[in-house]
Image (cartoon, grey):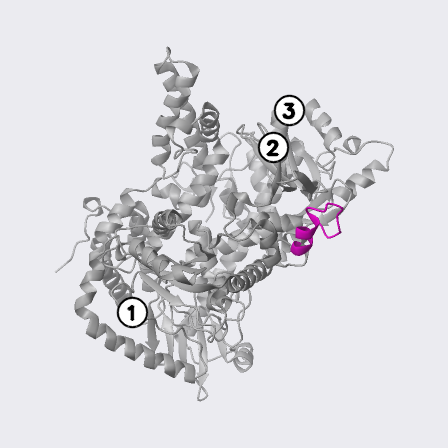
Amino acid sequence: MNIEPVDLNSLNISKLAVGVLCSLTDVDDFNYLARGLATLPIPLQGRMARKYIDRYNSKDQKSRYKANQWIGRTINRLKPRFGVLFSITQSMPLPWHILSSAEKTKEHASNIAANAAQIMTDLADEHPQATYEELIYIIFYQLIEFADGYKVQAPHKNVPRNNLTADLVEIALLKMKCEKWWARKLKGVRRQYIELLEIATGQVGKDLFYDYKNGKPKRRGISPYSSKSAQREYATAQESGIEFLKMMELEGSDGSVIDLIKAVKKGMANPVNRRNELMMRIRETEELADEMGFVGMFYTLTAPAKYHANSKNWYGSTPKQTQQYFNETWAKARAKLNRLGITYFGVRVAEPHADGTPHWHMMLFMPKHQMQTLNAILRWYFIQEDKHELYERRTRRTELFKLYKQKRKEYGFLKSKGKKPKEPNKFFRTFSPRFEAVLIDKRKGSAASYIAKYISKNIDGYKLLDHLDDETGEGFAKFDENGKVIKNNINPVLAWASTWRIRQFQFLGSPSVTVYRELRRIRTQTNNEHIEPIRQAADEARWKDYVKLQGGMCIGRDANFKTHYEITKLGNDYAETVKHIKGVVHVLSNSTLKTRLVEWQRQLKGTSAKTAQADTTHVGSADLSWTSGNNCTPLAVRDRDELLLDMIGFTEQELKEVKKDLLSGKKIKRNDLIYQIREGQLIVFDHQAQVKERKREYTEHLAHSLAQKQADAERYQAQQTAKANWDVLTPEQEKTMHEHGHVLVGRRVYHMQDGKLTSFKKVEFNDLEQFIPAQPTTEHWSHAREVIELAFSFAEQEQRESPISNKFNKNLLLIGDLELAELVLQGRASAIGQDDWWDVGLMA
């Protein structure tokens, strides 16, 4: 019986999924995949289809069976979550074809900003009788709803109406009509929404299983804390940021010049410095608590089940919403503690569970006689929500106690093997899933040692190689195939915090650390008798003495020393009042220590040297060569450059925006000229130079494309060879086998066992790239130049600036300038006529 393919028009399937389906030739597989994808939300269909086709087209003999088995198993696993999945996809802030691309999302910001501006204009027309102040409030509240539709919080949205001044409203309106403001907001929204989809589809979690082949735990491609896509995006952003820092320098008002990246490494952006300062503050806070006779408690606070993605009660909440639950609950508990006059101070750490849901660790110090009251208040507030979940545990108390005893045995076994697991808590208690309080025992270690692991885990994993992760049961270190620790491994916890914008560390009751850091800027003794003692304490990293000189713990706004700011009204593009730190002020005497002695300007590296060289000539640097396509004046030569740019048609405001764009590497077009900064020089392209630049870009792209095609062809040939005779190696492959114990053939890695190749595994595409880099050769570059030159000549005949591609000719052949040039060079086609350039005569 002939089976007909299912009608895709009758199914709710995305265009991307349809494209994947059309690549299947087997009708049974086609129908099975189509019906399965139709049950999924639209944004998930393309993702699942791509993963299916990767498995389907693998060289495994059972690839088709395994692909169908995988899609069926995955859909069945997601069935209980279909309600949540559809709810998430229905609340998409942007259409999926935009949201799935970072570049398209950024570009879409201009459309949203234009829509916001149009709303302002329309409302002004609708309320002609309203005063200016009445009108801006009407517009403001309308734009709040507009921003909510994109999951973006409008500026000053939560300010009470009585405190919402006209100035704040004007600032909000200026931001919501700004393209750059929307681009920044949508960037975060996109990252969080995509990560939420990863969490919802089970791509974030523990998911360990035992591999009987090597006797070790293994993952099914699932990452704890944050998804692999979030980690890749975080790593890319970090690399991009580092590259930008390497390109820039800082020039001081005193004439000194330093590399920007060196300045950053000396600050708190350096994880080593950040960890060292945190541990120093914790250690000396503990010493101060000992002097005061306080006791220490270590708390672990966990959210209700509905916030956890691995729970059947999960309703689609994000880690950001869970963090908001903690903040609001802690605010209620803190208000209660303050009303009762309970004194406490310490530190709070927010970190994720394996499924990405945050939980809190708190180390607090308090008077011994207030300890029980503080514990009771925290416990009461943090178990209120969905308390019925905890009552249900009472019936399982005996069962849970037996399980606790088993965990204690496992804990003792791991310790006997030299591991350092976390001692299990007494989870058989009714409130244990939400609240755990442990009295810090000095015999087991200092208070700092209780929290040191959590500090290190959430920064750089320092000295945690032999520790086990509480969430995953794995070691913190990652090892390569040779058993060596992988350096510069991406910390998934940092990727998690960056994606969800969650503050990881917060000190409670501690004086301002900003004042401490400002005082450390001054390394020499001062003559100010009020400030010198605390400056010296900060300079010598004596945090305990610094706290005492500030007035002690929990001093709050009554601290003796505060940050001194320089206030600039209308200080940015949004007319906000901008505060710049200038020093430290002693409140009682009102004496000030200026800590920012040098004003720094960021600029491209080498700008200072080029400026100095220009100043030694008889003409200004702006008067140097401005010929087309040549290295020209550095943009950092401010006055002369501004004068010259103004002469070619830029207004003062345009000049300000142009400089920002140029410093970011963009090309600016004005009066048929294109401006760009390269290697610290302002380059100008006239028409001829623009054509030359376009040719260069086209050639570079084509050369890399040709190299990639050749690499793919070689890769495919290697796969076919391996499939036909997979146990025969070339001499080069044998050499690789002896040196490394494995060899790559096509997209498979083979291992030698008993003199024969008996095991292999598929290599992921990203892993394959490091074995077969697709770099253009001399032949690729030469051929690309010929094609591009010929294509540009075709375009010039039709008075077009650049070649076009993919245009139908009279025979409905998909042909364009680039395709035509390729065919002509191959001798398979010739261009006939100048008017009908696409009328191609194909040669036999």
Q: Reply above or below: 745 against 638.
A: below
User: Which residue is outermost to the top?
Assistant: 129
- Camera-side residue of 593 and 367: 367
Residue 164: x and y in percent read: 42, 28
Where is residue 635? Give x, y as percent: 70, 36
* Residue bearing mark 2: 567
Give, as a three-letter code, the residue at label 2: Ile
Packing grade of label 3 (10 A; few <14, some 14-19, many >=20) is few
Q: Is residue 526 magenta?
A: yes
Residue 748 falls in image quadrant: bottom left
Residue shown at 59%/54% (left/top)? 548
Extreme residue in the front direction: 369
Is the residue 137 above or below the residue 562 in the image? above
Q: CA distance from mark 3 to mark 2?
A: 24 Å
Q: How far across and how far down the image is residue 458, in percent? A: 48, 61
Q: Position of residue 670 (x, y in %)?
A: 62, 27
Residue ID at (45%, 62%): 765
Tell me the magenta residue range.
522-538
Compare residues 701 and 145 and report the one nearer the observer: 145
State whether residue 317 appears in this view: yes
Q: Quadrant of the N terminus?
A: bottom left
Amino acid type for the residue under numbered disc 1: Phe
| Element carrying mark 3 | helix
Closer to the camera in the image, 809 or 686 = 686
Task: Give the CA distance from mark 3 to mark 1.
Answer: 66 Å
In the rendered image, is residue 837 in sight? no
Neighbor class of circle 1 (other Cα within 10 Å; few <14, some 14-19, many 20+) is: some
Q: Earlier in the sequence, mark 3 or mark 1?
A: 1
Give the mark, 1 or 2, whose residue is nearer the N terminus.
1
Q: Which residue is mark 1?
A: 427
